Image (cartoon, rainbow, N blue to C red):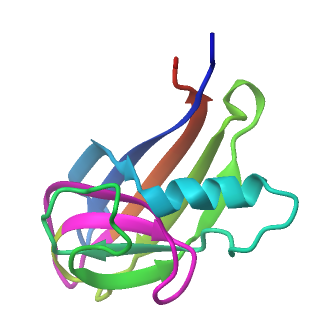
Amino acid sequence: MRAGIGALVNVHAVLRGPDGRIEVERRAHNLVTDVGCAHIADQLASSQDEAAMSHMAIGTGSAAPAGGDTTLATELDRNALDSFTQSAGADDHKVVYVASWAAGDGTGALVEAGILNAASAGTLLARVVFSVINKGAADTLEITWTLTIADDGS
């Protein structure tokens, strides 16, 4: 019997209005891309050829995520991660990525997001599409992305 390792990812996006109150909240499951899987293997090797994940992008493209994706469908804005940490204790098999967009940053009808390892271009670890989040110029957005490494049961 063979055991496999899988990468499961959950996304939580929170849009806050100018008063700081939650206006929209979205939860979604994403797709780890083929190049994202290769990146995970690279990071586990004795010498890493690729940079660690460092940025999150948001966009307006609604095409369904596919394993062959290497970019967002229509990237609108990309910011450096606020944090990326390995959870502790019983959750030590999880990595949590957090990025935020301030008022005036990344304004638009957002329906996709992705994690990448560069300020431009780079490797797309994962991509998600969700119901529209209309981010106005005075709104803020925070996306928390949890990557779980777990036995996939194979």
The image shows residue 4 at horizontal and vertical percentages of: 59, 27
The image shows residue 146 at horizontal and vertical percentages of: 51, 46
Q: Main secondary structure of the magenta part?
A: strand
In this picture, residue 98 sits left or right of residue 30: right
Q: Residue at x 45, y 57 (%)?
A: 34
**Is 51 included in the stretch rendered in magenta?**
no
In this picture, residue 146 sits left or right of residue 58: right
Q: Is residue 81 visible in this depiction of the protein? A: yes
Is residue 83 shown above or below 89? below
Q: How many marks?
A: 0
In this picture, residue 1 sits left or right of residue 122: right
Q: Residue at x 88, y 59 (%)?
A: 46
The image shows residue 76 at horizontal and vertical percentages of: 26, 84
Q: Residue at x 31, y 56 (%)?
A: 14
Say which quadrant the N terminus sits in: top right
Q: Which residues are magenta?
A: 111-140
Is residue 32 shown above or below 60? above
The image shows residue 151 at horizontal and vertical percentages of: 59, 24
**Residue, far front:** 1
Q: Is residue 106 visible in this depiction of the protein? A: no
**Residue, far top:** 1
Q: Residue at x 63, y 20 (%)?
A: 3
